[in-house]
């Protein structure tokens, strides 16, 4: 074993220095995707651009998987030297990091169902409509900036189009590459059309740490050379993303040296919304409200269903007991995330639930299993002689539950219930995977746009604590008050 | 005197073990009968069977004209008459922990007998007062002494005005002075025309209180 390890180490050394670059293979083709022939490798036009850069720098490209929304933070942390895979050129990004020259021009295009193609041609036509896109992108900001339109944020670029076909959203605004890929995925079934008029134009860039401006200049030199000698064009043609706009972009880039590169005559870069915090406060407040509403409604459902399940376990016959036990064990034994996906996407063929309702259902049904066990324990903790005493006094079983067992069980259950509610409040952040923008998701969008987690993270933590600390206090009060009974 | 409780050849079995075999006894109105015997002989079981809290497999039980048959305990809905006639005071009192002494008494008055809150309140205060715990009406069970809790438990059992009162080891947690007071209380209840069946292993208390003693042997 030590010999083979030595051989591998030597091979790595002789392969030369590496250039670690970060991207998100979940984004898929044509950017970065797992190679179908060898899942340990990635392929895509961004992969080839990264390899071109590495070659130009005399290094070997090494891919590092990173969540798309975290590329900026990861590159600044030093997880890798360059971040790519559809990274947009924004002023905020330029201000906070070292950014290369644009190497690809994309258009934000609107996709609508074929029957709506005639009436919804631009964002202005979509007043009061639900328009989907990826969170924390230029497209999302465009939607936020458009009045009287409901932006729906997704974590991936597949479900916006499937939800468009399913009627859950009315339009999708995304990069033309993503839209065209979604069309191809339909394999001839035209579930949507792409409006020819682009809503906006943007650029993909590579992002480096602020301190890495020297490396950025070298990368710029390599990129511009690859534009001039046709390397990039060959790559883009191979991945079927070449168009005239790319040639025009390459012509506009004027580099005296790697440091002094300018793009002439291009559309203005997206600007972050003014000051870092104030424009986001209304959406943060709205997201906090959604978190509270979602948690309250889910908890109410968990309590009702939990009571039914606990009653089934305590009072039911053998069949009911078995059924409720199976439910509780399955729900507690599988991830909430999985349950969210199943209820929202898995059941979409049978019943098309609105995202907020699906979120309440998933959280409510999940927590019901935990509540049921709390209530069962609480019901069984009421001393049986008291129940027998109630029977000798002529109470019916329902009366015993309502007047004797229930009120005492409630006292035993209140503290753990309150703790569960605090946990639910935080677990509600998971529902962003099914497009509900709650507090954590809104914070992530805000953090990505301002390029830092410090202020958004602190603000988000303060809001969560403002909601959860009083509840934790309440739980302790319940415990103190009834601990001696 | 008329017969309130008649038990003939009662047999109770836990699995293959006979807990009670061939027990026969009667309790008349106005009479206190002590059911005596060492621990584990089946005194508590006998009371529980009479109160229809557990089944018996042989014999007959008749409470003021209401017959209990061997076999499973009938559903609560078919025991309404028995419940009105039989009160049971548990050894550990089994008071409802979440309710005050007074509310322990009013609960059945309001929800079983359908009395108004005001009527139930007055009756409960009278009952607690007659048992010398009127001033503890608003105390929670955990705030009561053993003797007070027992008197509240008796008051609760008397709320439905049962003709037959069953008491399980009533002197277990009482000092000698309290035993004397309890004896007087029970005699007063019997004097009012009730029949009392008291399970106890306290022979002195039995001799001083009961009109008759039925001995159970292992």
Image (spheres, helix red, strand yellow):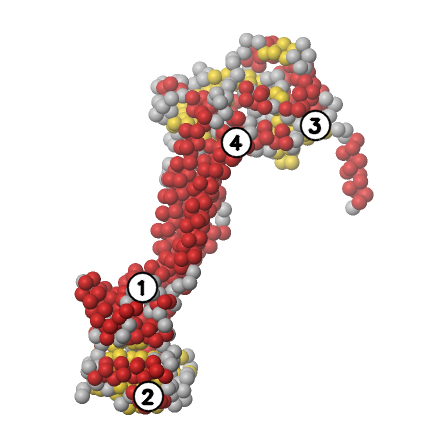
Q: Is residue A218 above or below residue A393?
A: above
Q: Please determine if labels 3 and 1 lie on a single subunit.
A: no
Which residue is label 2 attached to?
A: B206
Mark 2 vs mark 1: which is more N-terminal?
1
Structural crowding at the residue carrying mark 2, measured as other residues with C-alpha within 10 Å and reported as few (<14), some (14–19) or many (≥20): many
Q: Chain of mark 4?
A: A
x and y percent of residue B202 in the render? Answer: 37, 86
Which residue is label 4 attached to?
A: A455
Dot 4: element: helix
Residue B95 falls in image quadrant: bottom left
Q: Mark 2–mark 4 contact, CB under 8 Å? A: no
> Gap between marks 2 and 1, in whole Å?
32 Å
Label 3 or label 2, whichever lies nearer to me, is 2
Which residue is label 3 attached to?
A: A19
Q: Residue furthest right?
A: A3
x and y percent of residue A324 in the render? Answer: 40, 56
């Amino acid at each position: 074993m030590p010999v083979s390890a030595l051989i591998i180490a030597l091979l790595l050394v002789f392969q030369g220095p590496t250039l670690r670059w970060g991207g998100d293979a979940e984004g898929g083709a044509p950017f970065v995707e797992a190679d179908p022939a060898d899942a340990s490798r990635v392929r895509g036009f961004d992969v080839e651009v990264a390899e071109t850069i590495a070659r130009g720098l005399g290094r070997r490209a090494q891919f590092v998987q990173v969540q798309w929304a975290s590329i900026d933070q990861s590159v600044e942390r030093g997880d890798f030297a360059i971040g790519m895979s559809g990274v947009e050129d924004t002023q905020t990004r330029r201000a906070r990091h070292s950014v290369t020259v644009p190497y690809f021009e994309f258009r934000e295009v609107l996709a609508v169902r074929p029957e709506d193609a005639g009436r919804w041609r631009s964002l202005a036509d979509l007043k009061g409509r639900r328009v989907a896109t990826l969170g924390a992108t230029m497209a999302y900001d465009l939607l936020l900036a458009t009045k009287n339109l409901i932006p729906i944020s997704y974590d991936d670029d597949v479900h916006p189009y499937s939800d468009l076909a399913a009627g859950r959203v009315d339009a999708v605004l995304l990069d033309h590459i993503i839209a065209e890929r979604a069309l191809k995925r339909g394999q001839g079934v035209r579930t949507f059309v792409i409006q020819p008029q682009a809503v906006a134009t943007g650029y993909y860039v590579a992002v480096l740490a602020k301190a890495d401006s020297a490396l950025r200049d070298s990368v710029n030199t390599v990129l511009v050379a690859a534009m001039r000698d046709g390397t990039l064009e060959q790559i883009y043609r191979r991945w079927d993303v070449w168009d005239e706009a790319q040639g025009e972009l390459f012509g506009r880039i004027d580099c005296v040296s790697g440091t002094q590169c300018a793009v002439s005559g291009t559309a203005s870069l997206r600007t972050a919304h003014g000051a870092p915090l104030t424009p986001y406060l209304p959406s943060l407040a709205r997201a906090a409200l959604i978190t509270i509403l979602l948690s309250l409604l889910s908890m109410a459902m968990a309590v009702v269903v939990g009571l039914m399940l606990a009653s089934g376990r305590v009072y039911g016959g053998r069949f009911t007991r078995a059924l409720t036990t199976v439910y509780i064990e399955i729900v507690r034994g599988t991830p909430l995330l999985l349950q969210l996906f199943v209820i929202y996407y898995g059941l979409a063929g049978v019943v098309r639930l609105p995202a907020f309702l699906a979120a309440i259902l998933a959280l409510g049904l999940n927590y019901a299993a935990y509540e049921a066990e709390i209530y069962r324990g609480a019901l069984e903790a009421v001393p049986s002689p008291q129940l027998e005493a109630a029977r000798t006094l002529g109470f019916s079983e329902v009366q015993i539950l309502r007047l004797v067992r229930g009120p005492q069980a409630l006292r035993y259950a209140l503290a753990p219930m309150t703790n569960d509610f605090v946990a639910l409040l935080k677990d509600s952040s998971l529902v962003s995977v099914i497009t509900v923008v709650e507090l954590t998701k809104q914070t992530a969008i805000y953090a990505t746009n301002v390029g830092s987690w410090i202020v958004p993270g602190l603000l988000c933590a303060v809001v969560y604590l403002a909601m959860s600390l009083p509840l934790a206090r309440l739980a302790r009060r319940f415990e103190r008050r009834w601990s001696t009974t | 005197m008329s017969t309130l409780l008649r038990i003939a050849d009662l047999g109770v079995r836990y699995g293959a073990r006979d807990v009670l075999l061939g027990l026969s006894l009667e309790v008349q109105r106005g009479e206190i009968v002590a059911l005596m015997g060492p621990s584990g002989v089946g005194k508590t079981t006998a009371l529980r069977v009479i109160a229809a809290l557990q089944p018996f497999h042989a014999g007959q039980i008749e409470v003021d004209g209401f017959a209990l048959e061997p076999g499973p305990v009938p559903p609560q809905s078919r025991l309404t008459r028995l419940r009105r006639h039989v009160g049971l005071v548990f050894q550990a009192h089994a008071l409802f922990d979440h309710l005050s002494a007074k509310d322990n008494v009013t609960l059945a008055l309001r929800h079983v007998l359908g009395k108004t809150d005001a009527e139930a309140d007055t009756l409960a205060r009278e009952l607690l007062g007659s048992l010398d715990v009127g001033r503890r009406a608003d105390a929670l069970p955990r705030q009561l002494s053993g003797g007070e809790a027992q008197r509240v438990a008796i008051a609760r059992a008397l709320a439905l005005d049962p003709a037959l009162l069953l008491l399980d080891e009533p002197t277990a947690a009482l000092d000698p002075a309290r035993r004397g007071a309890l004896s007087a209380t029970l005699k007063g209840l019997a004097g009012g025309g009730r029949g009392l069946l008291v399970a106890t292993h306290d022979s002195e208390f039995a001799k001083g209180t009961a009109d008759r003693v039925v001995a159970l042997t292992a």
